[in-house]
Image (spheres, rainbow, N blue to C red):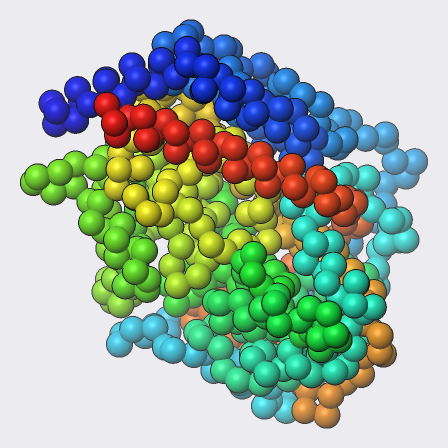
Amino acid sequence: MATAAAGCQHRATLAGALPRTSAAFLFLSVVAVAAVVSARWITSTAVLQGRLTRLPTTAAIPAAAAAALHPEAEHPQYPRPSAAAPSPPPTSRPPPSALYTISCPALNLSHSHPTGPPKTSQTLARALSSSSTCPSSPGPPPPASAATPSSNRSCPSYFRFIHEDLRPWRAAGGVTRAMLGRARLTATFRLVVLGGRAYIQRLRPAFQTRDLFTIWGVLQLLRRYPGRVPDLDLMFDTVDWPVVRTHLYRGKYAGVMPPLFRYCGDDSTLDIVFPDWSFWGWPEINIKPWHALQEDLKDGNNRVRWMDREPYAYWKGNPSVSATRQELVKCNVSSTQDWNARIYAQDWFKESKAGYKDSDLGSQCSHRYKIYIEGSAWSISQKYILACDSMTLLVTPKYYDFFSRSLMPIQHYWPVRDDNKCASIKYAVDWGNSHKQLAQRIGKQASNFIQEELSMDQVYDYMLHLLTEYAKLLRFKPTKPPEAVEVCSESLACQAEGLEKKFLFDSMVKSAHGAGPCDLPPPFSSRELKMLKQRGQNSVKQIEMWEQRASRA
């Protein structure tokens, strides 16, 4: 440990010398210029207010890099109304929205799975085969304010990627029935919305309850915004990996490009990303609906002050799902080496038998640093890790979900090299422990982003805008497929049992939302996208340069 401490001190001294070198100064000038140009396209509401104090010349982050932590302190931002700005008083108070009700048999929360979680849920199958019918009306009529175009608030910056995800079909002239039919090849279910009512055609079973809770999320959107969701017809794939390869649909082949919705994408695919099922709960591993879990994480952040937390990088998860996670396990502390990482393998089968007593996410905010690493594809754990006030050490990702493309290195997380994980993690922790206030600030900016920019209000607004923009591209009139069955909140909730039923009721929208959604920002220009990408790359290169200099010391 003494050797590690000495190495830490030596690296801090070395990093402090970086601003004195002309090469570093030139590189940081590039970083600063990129931040100036691109800062107005990145949402800054999650960033703490105030100008970041410049560090002395012995600090590891010079002023240019510090500006990346606080772009709004140095540069103008993309115009956005402040959430705290008072709005003009209404001329008259609108009547409260009518409450939705569901009449089901009493909840039975005693069911469990003593032999471990099931591979699939039968709730959706029972609902689709049930003879029960949905209410004649999908719910109370839209409130009087539904005619207003918006809630007079701007959406977070990641909403701009809605335009990017749909751009290929817009360029192709829209979505045809032939395109939709091609998307069926791998889809888990087909969703048709007609007149505010939802119809589902189940094409193949999903893993666990992914399809059930994804469909439930859409049903809650229909309840939250009655009369606002347009008629549409789409295919949804609940498998992790994106499959619509960009290179296969260029030129004349764009006419058969399948519009396939799923939870994540990458730079070589065209899958349309959509909020994942866990926002409404993941009963198989006892993860609560997001609105409740956000409060748990907020409480967890207050249990231990950041300065009093364990000065190491924490990760807990299932390492067996990917080679990169198995490599991460090698970074754990041992009798011969301490990489400043504390790695814990999660066995969900044992956890389910033990009542999940060791998997409470709100109790996992006890370290200054938390590691995010992808699994077989993207991982839903990202939002939980970023919400912890800890500085997130984000191992170079391949995939993105609907919100992660607006996260910036050094501003919301610290980048970790995938090809040199252990040394990269050790350097990040050494740096953070030498610059506690800056490390704490990065962690706080990330958790502010998650709490403010990723509330369920924002999730529903994203869904509404995405589905609305998608529906505009349809070149045919949606109709109910013969095999599709109408589903509603009643038909799903009343067929569920145990924790599934509890989470469905806990995440149920209780009344229509009086105001409209946030205002969808305009698409990116090609120049804006290029500068946004360049800004992130510059920040990552800066960190890699520091690591390389430290390794040669």
The residue shown at (39%, 17%) is 18
Q: Return the residue found at the far top.
A: 56
Q: Is residue 62 visible?
A: no
**Res 134 quadrant in image:** bottom right
User: Could you say which is closer to the camera, residue 163 or residue 140?
Assistant: 163
**Side of 477 where 238 appears, left or right:** left
Q: Residue at x 80, y 83 (%)?
A: 479
Residue furthest left as drawn: 335
Q: Is residue 109 above or below residue 506?
A: below
Q: Which residue is drawn at the image coordinates 13% and 38% (left, top)?
A: 337
Residue 312 place in picture, x, y as percent: 26, 34
Of 81 and 39, the residue lying toward us:
39
Q: Where's residue 491, x and y in %?
A: 62, 78
Whether residue 255 is visible to the viewer of this picture, yes or no, is: yes
State the image coordinates of residue 505 (x, y, percent, origin top left).
55, 64
Q: Nearer the viewer, residue 289 or 260?
A: 260
The quarter of the picture where the N terminus appears is top left
**Residue 24 occupies quadrant:** top left
Percent position of residue 177, x then y: 77, 81
Q: Which quadrant does the C terminus fall into?
A: top left
The residue shown at (39%, 33%) is 544
